[in-house]
Amino acid sequence: MDASHGHQGADRRWTAFYPAGASTEIEGTAYRTIGDLVRSVSATYGRAPAFTTCLPNGMNGTLSFAQVDEMSDAFAVYLREVAGLAPGDRVALQMPNGLAFPVAAFGIFKAGCVLVNVNPLYTAEEMARQFEDAEPRALVIVDMFAGKIPAATRGHPIPNIVVTRVAEFLPALPRGIVGLVQRWWDRSVAPVEVPHVRLPDALEAGRAHRTRDHVEVDAYRQALGPGDLACLQYTGGTTGVAKGAMLSHGNLVANMEQSLEMIPALTRGGEVALTALPMYHIFAFTVNLLAMYRIGARNVLIPGPRPLSNLRRAFENYRVTWMSGVNTLFNGLTNETWFLDSPPRHLRLASAGGMALQTAVARRWEEVTGAPLLQGYGLTETAPVLAFNPLGKARDGSIGVPVPSTLMACLDDDGRPVPPGTRGEIAAKGPQVMAGYWRRPDETAQALQGGWFRTGDIGVMDDDGYFHVVDRKKDMVVVSGFNVYPNEVEECLATHPGVLEAAVIGVPDGASGEAVRAYVVARDRGLTEQDIRAHCRAHLTAYKVPRQVVFRDGLPKSPVGKILRKDLRAEALAEGAAPRAAG
Amino acid sequence: MVGAFEQALLAAMIFVIMLGMGASLTPRDFYLALRRPQGLVIGVVSQYGFMPLIGFAMTLALALPPPVAVGLLIVSCMPGGTTSNIFTYFSRGNLALSVLMTVTSTVAGVVLIPLVLLIYAAALDLEIPRENIIATLLVLLVPVAIGMGLRRLSPNAGAVTEFFGSALALVFIAFIAVSWVPRNWQFLMTTAPATYAAAIGLGVIGIAIGYAFARALRLHPRNARTVALETGIQNAPLAIAIIALTFPADEQQAILAVGALYSLFIVVTSTAVTMLFRRANAAAEQKMPDSLL
């Protein structure tokens, strides 16, 4: 980690383009761990609102900085003293955005445990694979998805299950109404059938223990250092095998500071942030949850932004000054009548990540809102931000310049930097780069070579140090910022009795950036597109399910019989599946 | 037909419902509807241009006996009622536009109702009860304003009010439809088919023509759905009050027939149309990928 600090000797021409007021280095940050950060920031902002959950109908609940601090303390005590977890034990967190998220996440960090974010939409099979690998000793899960627990934990039980809900910590009346509607009208919540404790009860137990046994919560975090593991953030990496990127407290705190340096226009204690992206994804986790907390912003959390009209009340009821999103979200909003009628008047800046931001979308957004939309770039393994477009100096189609204390280069196949204007694999060094993959030394060795983290993206650096992504080394498909690995989808397709063989590629798609397309050689003629999709839906999260299914008599193969996805991609592009807007 | 207690109960229900409707609105919604007043103008033209024409055409087509024809004409000349706001809300239409249309057509009705009747009924001398008009406006505007204020004061208070208001609206609609039939069983059995056709047709054709007209003038589908419901749904209680005030008791029964039947069937028709509109609205919604969004 130390090697990543101080790149003064290296060529960092891009620092000339940093926004006014930004430093080129994040000096040995003020916080050693996320727990330290939460304690210190909470003391500064005290009773100011920190998080507000806003439901589609406008019902809402708010926690102040002081409340988040106290409640996460209680949860830390619960984990350590009541549930009996030790420092370094994993705690899985599976929930959409809501007030329980920061309480649970910060509590896990304060306890010295390791947070494992789990996509709440995962099928039981996908959950099981992640649980098998991370071996969490506790799971915090939203009631809507608790029905998947028995199937997901078969064979490797999780001893402590804490159940929360979307309307957690809302005032009693709205909370009761939401509960009744979910139970009896939507039928999205069923009684939880596994032994569990409710989050508010867990907090009560933690508080009781703290008073009775005089537990020193501060001692938990004081025993931790920046090098200690904070998160296992799952990703397919470059090879598609799901694995946990080991992000330390130091990685996350550094990346939070680096991201903030690039947006110095935001004021301390004066912003209202909109969090429509899920915080279980590393982008919103670092940039929204951590960075906005750090600057004392009020963070408006949206549990589910689909359909987009779910965001309307949040925009009407709160003076949003900053938001993050992906291309899909910005594009979608600028096609909503209500958004065009009343664009957010107080918006100062929006940050895009997760997937390529299309220039046309950025232009339209800036026209509608009058606020700049800046694109950044990063990966799960880098906590995630590596590059961002500087305010006022953004370049179309570029991912921007490396953030402070970060070295980026395009490397040739031998690992040597190529000159500006030449293609190479983007690689990075910096305090945000992970220590490695959880229990996978081989994968780690492949990703971290000669001190560089290899991104698997092919890029070009221009003469000023702005980077452009031009291609991807791996076959991964990015659907609205979520990685889909062809291997996983192909394996699922292969389990269908009617499928002889299958190949999966990504094709350009206007709405989601890329869409999953499956080429299928059918064993029996009666096989339909619907059969394929229904089969995939039963085993995979919805975004992995092929949007397009093409039946073929055979697939292009190399002499050794390897299916050539590259040829299929070229074919797809040639037949006119070209993107609607330039990327 | 309806006792004083029931009337008071209904008024109280409508008050709470409109409180909920108001809590779903912001001043900006009204500002936007007024900034582009085409919708409002189209709505009022549709209300007083098409509805009386439809009513008049049906009196001829169905060869209705004179008292029934007079009843039909009066109903067709009425402004929009509160019910139209409720159905607009549920059909995810433009509620601010709906409220503004109801207000405009009610106020304009003082002049326009006699004028339109002059054309179609050779100056049928009606007594328009001002107090009913004022009451209509008060029952509409006061709770809407309070509801908006509640939301501004606290988004939670607004959202809870909206929830209870809309829940009560469903009860209200069901109550009207269910309680009407047994109360008027005898009447239903003795009414002629032509009268049924007039009472049902006025609402159905009004909604259809209102929608077609608004769409032809390139109104956004959401606003067109609003104009459609506003056009087809008339303030039937006002028609009944007018008839009761104007005609001697022995003539009233036949004239009231269309108004009474209309009050029942417009609820049925509007419910069906609302479901159709909701489906159209859902189909027009942008499809977002399942992943990030």
Image: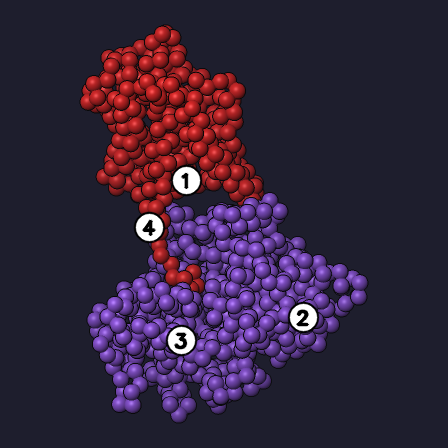
Chain colours: A purple, B red
- Residue highlighted by disc 3: A488
- Residue highlighted by disc 4: B283
- Closer to viewer: mark 2 or mark 1: 1
Q: Do labels 2 and 3 share a chain?
A: yes
- Closer to viewer: mark 4 or mark 3: 3
Please say whether residue A49 is visible from this viewpoint: no
Host chain of mark 2: A
Q: Is residue B141 left or right of residue A50?
A: left
Label 3 near label 2: C-beta < 8 Å?
Answer: no
**Disc 2 residue type (three-letter):** Ala
Q: Earlier in the sequence, mark 1 or mark 4?
A: 1
**Disc 1 residue type (three-letter):** Phe
Tell me the distance, in whole angstroms, between the alpha carbons under discs 4 and 3. 32 Å
Helix, strand or loop status at disc 1: helix
Host chain of mark 3: A
Tell me the distance, in whole angstroms, between the alpha carbons under discs 2 and 3. 35 Å
Residue A193 locus on image (x, y percent): 58, 60
Host chain of mark 1: B
Q: Do labels 3 and 1 share a chain?
A: no
- Residue highlighted by disc 2: A111
**Location of residue A502 by image quarter:** bottom left
- Residue highlighted by disc 1: B90
Q: Do labels 4 and 2 share a chain?
A: no
Q: In which quarter of the image is the C terminus of chain A?
A: bottom left
Which residue is at the front of the view, A56 or B219?
Answer: A56
Please say whether residue A107 is visible from this viewpoint: yes
Residue A84 locus on image (x, y percent): 70, 71
